[in-house]
Structure formats: structure tokens, C-alpha cells
Image (tube, rainbow, N blue to C red):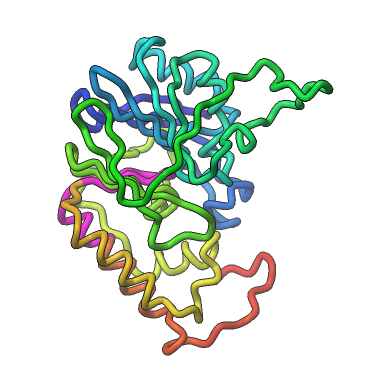
């Protein structure tokens, strides 16, 4: 059963657009053996003068996401798009559909022509854009804030990543948006809960297994010192009350934030080449 819901994380400021999917071995963000339900999270950061949408969701959820946005913003409100991982369908799948329906004034990206990354419909033989809008592209500048009204949103290159990935920090709500990191919590029920508080605990062994059995399989035997340093700098620099990943449950509360960063650091320390040697990983091997 699919589940679609908008959750207001901070009154009038941040909204999570939840759309669930079954875990059946087809989503690379989760171990092949994982079963149950998880959720893709797009986030709308809203001000009176404009809004910023982080990720645009899977194309399978197009109708739900368009309806969710219509419930939150006027079609004429200036809307900025920021796909956190332009190489991934969950980030870019509905960008064109949203641009056709809403007043998208720019798409922030690490490439100069974002339309070339968002064209999932066949181009016309004449070379036209098949009726799709041409999105103005703004090149992302790490640690250069995005202005939405009087609100400043900070953009950073993710300190741990497989492909080009951005993390976002919103000082107004003390929220860190982490794309595919801290995405390891799912449930048996499509309705969640998808917002967890300080009573929830994650074990080191679980996070270790999750990373090795997803797109971070390469970490074991890598040199992780620089990765750990980059993550620590994010934790020390920003006052984080909420971790908002692109997949899975949102983590809220300072104690839980501290615990999640500590667990990740411990796991990465155990992956370092000084502790364990790298080795060949057979397809489908779970660790």
C-alpha cells in the first residue's frame, strides 16, 4: 500500500513531502534483503516571497507530489528547485512536471545546462524540447548561501558521497538535509512513523551493515580519516536539531542527532584501512 502525506516540520517554514514505496530489492538505497516500507522525502522550504524545493521525487509519485505542492504554495509563487543528487531519479524525476505546473524561476545545479539532465521524454526529431520549459540554471557554489526572502540556506558538498551530492543546512529551523546519508531507518508500515524522536536508538552494527549493503559497500578498507573529519566539521559548525534525509525516517532532537553522528563516526573508524583490509565484494554478498 502506498502512502502519501505532507508533514509540517517547522510551522510555516519546512514541509516534508512523504511518498512511500515497498522494499523488495529494487531500490539501491536499501539492502537487497530489506523488506517492509520506506519513504522518499522531498522538502519544501517556504517564505512569503518564494520557496525552495529540495529534490523532486520519483516519477511514479508525480501526481502525489504535484498535489502536495498545490496544497502548500500558490502556482505563481517563485519556486526554486535544488536536486541534491542530479544523477539520481529520486532527485530529478519530477523536475519538468513541476516546472510545467508551477512558477519555477531557477534550478540550482553543479552543471551549466540542467535541462540536459532533466529530459526524460524523447526529444522531437527537430531537436525541440518536446514542450518542456527551459529551466534557468544557477550554478551552485559550496558554502555560498541561497537567499529565499530574508532566509539564508547554506549549501555544502556532502562530506560522504558516492556521486555528486549536496547537503543543505537551514539555520532558521536548525535542520540538516542529508540526501542519502542517515537514511537507514524504515518500518513495516507505510504510514510510518516517519518522524522519530530522542527515544529511538540506532546500533553501530546495524549502521555498519546498512552502509556495506547499499551504495557505500566500498567503505570497508578505504581511507576514512578525511571523510570523518568532514562529517565532524559539519556537526561542529552547525547547530543541528533535525536530520532530514532523502529516504526513511526524519530524526529530531539534539540527543538523537548527537547519537547518530557518533554512531556514524564509530562505524567509519572501523572501516579504515588501518583497521581492515579492502577486499573484493561479490555481487549480492551481504555483510
Image coordinates of residue 212 in percent, x first then y, are 51, 68
Image coordinates of residue 162 in percent, x first then y, are 52, 60
Res 250 quadrant in image: top left
* Residue 39 visible at all: no
Residue 20 counted in the magenta span: no
Vertical relation: 267 (above or below) 233? below
Say whether residue 282 is left or right of residue 287. right
The answer to which of 113 and 280 lies nearer the viewer is 113
User: Which quarter of the image is occupied by the C terminus?
Assistant: bottom right
Say whether residue 247 is left or right of residue 114. left
Q: At 50% across and 81% down in the image, what residue appears?
A: 221
Q: At 38% across and 70% down in the image, what residue appears?
A: 227
Image coordinates of residue 109 in percent, x first then y, are 48, 41
Q: At 49% across and 31% down in the image, what residue appears?
A: 56
Magenta stretch, residue numbers: 242-260
Image coordinates of residue 85 in percent, x first then y, are 50, 46
Vertical relation: 17 (above or below) 211? above
The answer to which of 49 and 213 lies nearer the viewer is 49
Which residue is most to the right? Answer: 125
* Residue 256 visible at all: yes
Residue 256 counted in the magenta span: yes
Say whether residue 17 is left or right of residue 215. left
Tag count: 0
Res 174 quadrant in image: top left
Amino acid at each position: 500500500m502506498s502512502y502519501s502525506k505532507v508533514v509540517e516540520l517547522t510551522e510555516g517554514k519546512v514541509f516534508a513531502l512523504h511518498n512511500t514505496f515497498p522494499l523488495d530489492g529494487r531500490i539501491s538505497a536499501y539492502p537487497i534483503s530489506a523488506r517492509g516500507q520506506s519513504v522518499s522525502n522531498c522538502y519544501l522550504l517556504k517564505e512569503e516571497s518564494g520557496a525552495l524545493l529540495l529534490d523532486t521525487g520519483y516519477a511514479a509519485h508525480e501526481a502525489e507530489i504535484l498535489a502536495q505542492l498545490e496544497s502548500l504554495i500558490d502556482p505563481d509563487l517563485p519556486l526554486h528547485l535544488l536536486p541534491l543528487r542530479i544523477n539520481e531519479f529520486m532527485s530529478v524525476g519530477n523536475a519538468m512536471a513541476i516546472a510545467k505546473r508551477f512558477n519555477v524561476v531557477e534550478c540550482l545545479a553543479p552543471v551549466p545546462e540542467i535541462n540536459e539532465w532533466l529530459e526524460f521524454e524523447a526529444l522531437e526529431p527537430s531537436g525541440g524540447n518536446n514542450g518542456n520549459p527551459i529551466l534557468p540554471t544557477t550554478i551552485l557554489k559550496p558554502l555560498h548561501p541561497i537567499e529565499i526572502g530574508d532566509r539564508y540556506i547554506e549549501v555544502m558538498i556532502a562530506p560522504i558521497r558516492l556521486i555528486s551530492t549536496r547537503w543543505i543546512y537551514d539555520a532558521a529551523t536548525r535542520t540538516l538535509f542529508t540526501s542519502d546519508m542517515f537514511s537507514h531507518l524504515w518500518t513495516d508500515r507505510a504510514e510510518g512513523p516517519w518522524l522519530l524522536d530522542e527515544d529511538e536508538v540506532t546500533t553501530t552494527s546495524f549502521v555498519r551493515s546498512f552502509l556495506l549493503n547499499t551504495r557505500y559497500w566500498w567503505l570497508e578498507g578505504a581511507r576514512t580519516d578525511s571523510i570523518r573529519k568532514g562529517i565532524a566539521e559539519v556537526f561542529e559548525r552547525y547547530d543541528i536539531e533535525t536530520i532530514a534525509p532523502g529516504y526513511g525516517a526524519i530524526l529530531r532532537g539534539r540527543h538523537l542527532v548527537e547519537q547518530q553522528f557518533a554512531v556514524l563516526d564509530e562505524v567509519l573508524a572501523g572501516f579504515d584501512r588501518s583497521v581492515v583490509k579492502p577486499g573484493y565484494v561479490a555481487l549480492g554478498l551481504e555483510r
